[in-house]
Image (tube, rainbow, N blue to C red):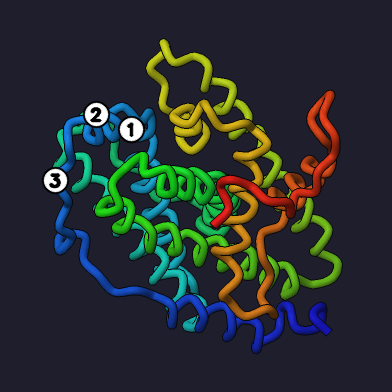
Amino acid sequence: MKARFIGSGEHKRLFCETFVQTHRPFEPSDIRWPQLEAESLARLRALPVWDEAVRTEAETALKVQTLGAREPDPVLARAIALQGYEEGRHAALLMLLTRHYGIAVRPFPPPLAPANPVWAFLSTGYGECLDSFFAFGLFAIARRSEYFPAALTDIFDPILQEEARHILFIVNWAAYLRAREPLAARPLWELRRVWTIAGQLVEHIRQGLKVGGRGTGSQEGFTMNARSAFDDLSARDFLEVCLAENDRRLEPYDGRLLRPTFVSSSVRLALRFPPRGQASRPPEGDSAWRG
């Protein structure tokens, strides 16, 4: 039943209308940034994320906006253009935050519009699926541990939910495009999609290996770098938090819509194997970090 639904006009309307109807209007300039105590301000400034975060959001916004402007289907164009607006809003919000709290951000050249916006959006979207899985967990840990004051984390909770909407849209959009390809063309399309995912995975692994090289000043792989702020948390507990938060963020949306599954399925499989020398425990077991 679901196989016939994916790629249909009903599927397109559902994932596009879901995205549009769950849009939350606000202007970054209207945000009232809380005054932080010296310790919280030092923690915020010390996060090794800001250069990469600001640059990535600016690049992503342009990629999505370019596709939205060129998409001939009015239903898809409306939703993609709205996502481009939200990505631009994320970039503006980060610029305002870093400016307000005196966080230095290295300048970067203006991003260039992609030559092939469809595959640029696909690549960026799969990168967001990888990043968001870990970002959801990091945010939950920071919030529950009160690593930052609630007045600050409350501002970013709906931003994280916007990211959940973005990755929900990308996987359904990609599945819709694949299903609309002629049967003879689907293997090649799927091969290119898998190659795109593999490229994002390799790049994230490469960036993750830089986490230990703090002396290099690199901020690439910012969601994995930020993990270093919580070194007292075991890798297993961290993954359990990420998995629970990923499920929670995506749970409210219509069950007919596809969810990103590559990272979550890989983590569920890994959590079935106990750490060396320890007895097995199911991933659904109690955790000190679960709400």
10 Å neighbourhood of mark 2: few (<14), some, or many (≥20)?
A: few
Residue at point 71%, 78% (across, down)? 7
Residue furthest out toward the bottom: 10
Residue 162, given in percent of the width and then of the height, sits at 43, 64
10 Å neighbourhood of mark 1: few (<14), some, or many (≥20)?
A: some
The residue beneath circle 2 is 42
- On the image, which quarter does residue 253 sit in? bottom right
Q: Secondary structure at mark 3?
A: loop
Q: CA distance from mark 1 to mark 2?
A: 17 Å
The residue beneath circle 3 is 35
* Amino acid type of the residue that numbered disc 2 sits on in the rendered structure: Ala
Residue at point 33%, 52% (across, down)? 153
Residue 107 visible from this viewpoint? no
Q: Is residue 253 above or below residue 262?
A: below
- On the image, which quarter does residue 112 sit in? top left
- Given contact means CB atoms under 8 Å apart, are the residues at marks 1 and 2 in contact? no
The residue beneath circle 1 is 51
The N terminus - image quarter: bottom right
Residue 61, given in percent of the width and then of the height, sits at 37, 55
Q: Is residue 122 above or below residue 218?
A: below
* Amino acid type of the residue that numbered disc 1 sits on in the rendered structure: Asp
10 Å neighbourhood of mark 3: few (<14), some, or many (≥20)?
A: few
The mark tally for this picture is: 3
Q: Who comes first in sequence, dot 3 or dot 2? A: 3
* Amino acid type of the residue that numbered disc 3 sits on in the rendered structure: Gln
Residue at point 37%, 54% (across, down)? 62
Q: Who comes first in sequence, dot 1 or dot 2? A: 2
